[in-house]
Amino acid sequence: MRRGLGPGPATRTAIALVVGAVFLVPIASMVEFTLRDGDGHSLVHWATLFDPAGAGKYAPIREGLVNSLVLAAVTVAIVLLLLAPTMVLVTLRLPHLRRPFELLALLPVSLPAIVLVVGLAPIYRVIGQTIGTGVWSLALAYGVTALPYAHRSIQAAIDAIGVRTLAEAARTLGSGWPTVLLRVLAPNLRGGLLTASLISVAVVLGEFTIASLLARQNLQTALFVVNRQDPYVAVILSLLALALVFVLLLAIGRAGARGSGARPEGS
């Protein structure tokens, strides 16, 4: 039997160990740092986190976490309700615009965050004068930041299923465009849409530069504020935030995968 071109078990194990070390070594170092108490190691810094006297000091974390979750939800809505339908429209009706649209979608990844902020500052000045300076408006900038990654995920799913064939078959059977989009294409694009959503959430929860320069409060800017007062508590909160993000991404992944395991007979 001809062997595949993929890596063997030993190579996969080595890759898994290297990747695991890349993630585990910094996390283990952070945990060890939070346990230092001058003479040795203890849980004294973790205990201060539950001290009612320090509740006011950690208030920015609560506000930043809520703001980041709101931003993540709005950014995912932009990806699913604006980007995905636009890509389907380009594939079905405007295929000659696919390359220009792809280049436009990938452009943000080549620009430094400070350049994006300089370009977005006049726009946000108008947004602030028109609809206010609510934190949710920052999702417009985050939608641009997540655009390259979300675009690649959705485009790969579109190329894999043959969107044009499915749409033409559904239209031939009498389905309207809303039915084609929601009941035919969306379920088949579930994997790409889920991946785009996960990446968007990760980008939003880890973003600092744009929020800081545009004077908005999110999780990362709140951690920076707390770090100036107590670096040990800032690292502890970073670990808890990392665990929360992991659980959140896992929950989104399981929710999106629910029901996708059922495949038609013969597939």
Image (cartoon, rainbow, N blue to C red):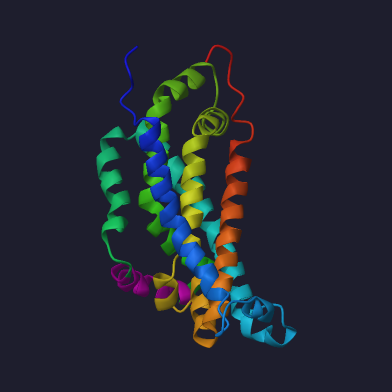
Q: Residue at x 45, y 56 (%)?
A: 23
Does 249 appear above or below 9? below
**Magenta stretch containing residue 192, yes or no?**
no
Quadrant position of the N terminus in the picture: top left
Viewer-proximal residue among 26 and 104: 26
Looking at the picture, how far across and down is residue 266, in whole percent?
Answer: 54, 11
User: Is residue 124 within the magenta segment?
Assistant: yes
Residue 209: percent from the left, percent from the top?
39, 72
Residue 216: image location, x then y, percent: 49, 76
Q: For the view shown, which residue lies furthest in the front direction?
A: 39
| Residue 98, picture quadrant | top left
Q: Horizontal placement of 48 versus 87: left or right?
A: right
* Image quadrant in which you'd find residue 90: top left
The answer to whether residue 89 shows anywhere in this view is no
Segment colored magenta: 114-128
**Residue 58 seen in the figure:** yes
- 91 relative to 212, above or below: above
